[in-house]
C-alpha cells in the first residue's frame, strides 16, 4: 500500500456527479476529497483526466481462457492465474469475481471434467501469499442440468470467498439457446460434431434436465445460503422464469435474453446485468436482446466484461455517452456491481472507502487508462 498519494487536477467521478478536484490516498483508503484544479506540491497532476473507483467485475470467463488457452491444453495454473490477474489490473478492474463452472455435464463426458475446487484452492493460495495485484472472489456458475453438481458444490465452504452463485441452465430450446440453431452452430464449431453427434448431444442434455434440473436448482440455492453468497439467475427469458428467480430471493439477473424478462426483473427489484461485448458489438452473439436496447429502455443496471476484460471500461463510457451522464455510465461498473454483491467498502469515491482507483482519458471515444491503484498501490 502507498503511504500517501494525491491525484490532483482530475475530473472526479463521484456518486451521481462529476466535478474537478483531487483525491488523497493514505493507508490504502481514500483519506480526503477536495474540489478545484489546484496541484499541491508532490501531487500527481492528472491534467483533467477522469479519476473514478476501480472497476468491479462480477462475471468473467477470462481465467478459464488462461488456464486452457487452446482445446486440451492445460497451462500451468499459477502462471495462468497471475497472468489473468495482471491482465485485469491492466484494464482497470480492481475487484473480480472469477467465474468457475461447478457441475460436470456428464461423468462419462471428458470434455466437462470437474476443475473448480482445485483451481479455487490454487487461486486462494496465491492470494494468501500476496502474489496477486487485485481483489479476487469466487463466482460459482452452478450448471443445474448435470449429474455432479451437488458433490462439486459440497467441496466448497464458508471460508472460500464464494461471493456469487449463479443458476445456469443451458438446456437446448430455452434461455440462452432458445434458438437451437445458435447452439448447433456453437457446438459444431467448438467440438466438430456432425449432425448425428449434435442430435445425440441435445437428447442427452434434455435427459439431464429432466432428471436433475429442479433438484439441483434447489441444492444450488441452499449452497449459496450456506456460503453467504449472493444468488444470481442467468439467461432468464420469460416473466415466469423471472418470477421463479424472485421466489428464490434472487436480486441479480445475468444477461436476461428478452425485453420481457428485463421488464419483469425491474418489476421484481432484480438488478439487470448485461455483457460489455454485447453493448460494444451492438448485439448478442447468441441472437438475444441487445444491451443497448435495454439501456435505452432504462432496464440496464450493471455491466460485466464477460469474455473481453478490456470491454468493461469501454462499455461504461459508451453508456455514459448514450445516457448523456458519464457518472451514471461509470456507475454500472463501479458502485452498482459492488452494491449488488454487498461490498460496501468499495465502488465509490468517498472518504474511508478502499483506495481502488483508476485514471483515464478519452481519445476518439475510447478510454485510455493512465493509472490503476488497488488499495493505494499502483498495479498498472
Image (cartoon, rainbow, N blue to C red):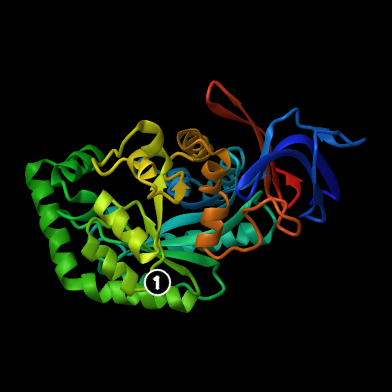
The front one of 108 and 202 is 202
- Residue beneath the point at 8% across and 42% down: 195
Which residue is farthest right?
Answer: 41
Residue 183, quarter of picture? top left
* Residue 374, position as x, y percentages in the image: 69, 49
Which residue is farthest top?
Answer: 364
Quadrant including the C terminus: top right
Residue 345, quarter of picture? bottom right
Q: Is residue 60 left or right of residue 177?
A: right
> Measured along the vertical axis of the image, is residue 219 above or below residue 132?
below
Q: Is residue 309 left or right of residue 352?
A: left
* Residue 267, position as x, y percentages in the image: 34, 62
Q: Is residue 107 visible?
A: no
* Residue 352, position as x, y percentages in the image: 75, 59
Q: Is residue 240 left or right of residue 160?
A: left
- Residue beneath the point at 18% across and 66% down: 209
Q: Is residue 13 left or right of residue 364?
A: right
Residue where numbered disc 1 is placed: 153
> Measured along the vertical axis of the image, is residue 116 above or below residue 361?
below
* Residue 237, position as x, y percentages in the image: 24, 55
- Residue beneath the point at 58% across and 43% down: 327
What is the crowding at mark 1: few (fewer than 14 residues within 10 Å), some, or many (at least 20)? many
Please tell me whether mark 1 sits on a helix, a strand or a loop. Answer: helix
Amino acid at each position: 500500500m502507498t503511504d500517501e498519494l494525491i491525484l490532483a487536477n482530475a475530473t472526479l467521478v463521484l456518486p451521481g456527479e462529476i466535478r474537478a478536484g483531487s483525491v488523497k490516498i493514505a493507508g490504502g483508503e481514500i483519506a480526503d476529497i477536495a474540489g478545484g484544479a489546484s496541484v499541491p506540491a508532490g501531487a500527481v497532476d492528472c491534467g483533467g483526466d477522469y479519476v473514478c473507483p476501480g472497476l468491479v467485475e462480477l462475471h468473467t470467463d477470462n481465467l478459464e481462457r488462461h488456464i486452457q488457452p487452446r482445446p486440451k491444453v492445460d497451462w500451468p495454473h499459477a502462471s495462468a492465474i497471475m497472468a489473468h490477474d495482471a491482465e485485469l489490473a491492466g484494464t482497470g478492474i480492481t475487484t473480480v469475481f472469477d467465474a468457475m463452472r461447478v457441475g460436470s455435464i456428464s461423468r462419462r463426458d471428458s470434455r466437462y471434467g470437474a476443475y473448480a475446487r482445485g483451481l479455487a484452492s490454487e487461486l486462494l493460495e496465491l492470494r494468501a501469499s500476496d502474489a496477486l495485484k487485485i481483489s479476487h472472489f469466487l463466482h460459482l456458475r452452478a450448471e443445474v442440468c448435470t449429474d455432479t453438481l451437488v458433490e462439486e458444490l459440497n467441496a466448497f465452504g464458508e471460508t472460500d470467498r464464494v461471493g456469487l452463485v449463479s443458476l445456469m441452465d443451458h438446456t437446448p430450446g430455452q434461455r440462452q439457446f432458445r434458438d437451437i440453431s445458435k447452439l448447433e452452430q456453437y457446438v459444431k464449431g467448438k467440438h466438430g460434431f456432425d449432425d448425428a453427434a449434435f442430435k445425440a448431444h441435445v437428447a442427452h442434455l434434455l435427459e439431464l434436465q429432466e432428471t436433475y434440473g429442479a433438484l439441483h436448482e434447489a441444492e444450488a440455492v441452499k449452497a449459496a445460503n450456506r456460503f453467504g453468497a449472493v444468488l444470481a439467475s442467468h439467461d432468464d427469458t420469460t416473466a415466469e422464469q423471472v418470477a421463479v428467480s424472485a421466489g428464490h430471493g434472487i436480486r441479480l439477473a445475468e444477461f436476461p435474453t428478452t425485453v420481457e424478462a428485463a421488464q419483469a426483473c425491474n418489476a421484481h427489484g432484480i438488478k439487470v446485468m448485461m455483457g460489455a461485448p454485447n453493448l460494444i458489438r451492438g448485439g448478442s452473439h447468441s441472437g438475444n436482446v441487445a444491451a443497448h436496447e435495454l439501456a435505452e429502455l432504462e432496464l440496464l443496471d450493471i455491466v460485466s466484461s464477460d469474455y473481453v476484460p478490456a470491454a468493461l471500461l469501454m462499455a461504461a463510457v459508451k453508456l455514459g455517452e448514450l445516457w448523456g451522464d458519464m457518472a451514471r455510465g461509470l456507475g454500472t461498473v463501479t458502485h452498482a456491481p459492488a452494491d449488488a454483491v454487498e461490498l460496501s467498502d468499495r465502488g465509490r469515491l468517498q472518504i474511508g472507502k478502499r483506495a481502488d482507483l483508476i485514471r483515464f482519458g478519452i481519445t476518439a471515444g475510447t478510454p485510455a487508462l493512465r493509472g490503476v491503484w488497488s488499495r493505494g498501490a499502483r498495479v498498472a
